[in-house]
Image: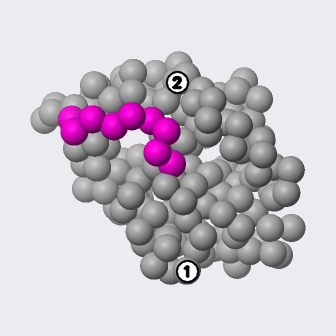
Amino acid sequence: MTVAVFDIDGVVADVRHRVHHVEGRWKDWDSFFDTADEDPVLDVGAALVHEMAQLHDIVWLTGRPEWLRRTTARWLEDAGLPYASLNMRPHHDYRPARFYKLDRLKAIHAAAEGGIATFIDDDPDVIEVALGAGFPAQLAEWVPRNARSEATMREIQEKLGRT
Ligand SMILES: [Mg+2]
């Protein structure tokens, strides 16, 4: 079976309501992660997951920390999304998201019989390295971006490696 790999935040989960917790210099990580269970579902992304699930196994690849697994699995279940295969950022792994995710993509590809059919992520840096490594990656562009949230997401994903 081939696999379709999906990011979570910005693809099926709308994190915009909690980004303000980590904007600016003083970051409230507890509040940022504690409110992850309140993320609205992004319907466009969820519909794409259901469509892909007809043809492929669904594998999640998120930069969320491993300790958020129960919250994340429950959120996926409540959203009616498959949650069997959930790759999360290991404890103390603060590498930029693009390095962490490329490593995991390679491992997922090696483990899947038919390889990776598609990979969807909302981070242009992640998509760039995935395409560079030969993976069929597509940028999720259904969440409207603004300069401030863009800068914050880049900082917490790429510079601080926290999600
Ligand atoms: Mg994302």
- Per the image, the residue denoted by label 1 is 134
Task: Report the side of 87 relative to 49 (left or right).
Answer: left
| Count of marks overlaid on the render | 2
Can you identify the residue that label 2 sits on? 39
Indicate the position of residue 22 as horizontal and vertical percent values. Answer: 26, 32
Residue 151 higher or lower than 14, as above or below: below
Residue 142: tell me if it is visible. Answer: yes
Q: Earlier in the sequence, mark 2 or mark 1?
A: 2
Marks 2,1: beta carbons within 8 A:
no
* Label 1, ligand 1: CB separation under 8 Å: no
Asked if residue 111 lies left or right of residue 125, the reply is right
Residue 93: within the magenta? no
In three-dimensional space, the C-alpha distance between marks 2 and 1, rounded to whole angstroms, equals 32 Å
Q: Callout 1: 10 Å neighbours few (<14), some, many (20+)?
A: few
Q: Which residues are magenta?
A: 140-148
Tell me the SS state at disc 2. loop
Residue plotted at (15% across, 33% down): 24
Q: What is the basis of the colouring in this image?
A: one colour
| Quadrant the N terminus occupies | bottom right
42 shown above or below 60: above
Q: Label 1: state its secondary structure.
A: loop
Residue 107 placement (x, y as % from top left): 63, 73
Quadrant of residue 119 within the rendered picture: bottom right
Q: Which amino acid type corresponds to the residue marked 1 in the rendered image? A: Gly
Q: Which residue is at 43% across, 72% downward? A: 129
Q: Nearer the viewer, residue 28 or 60?
A: 60
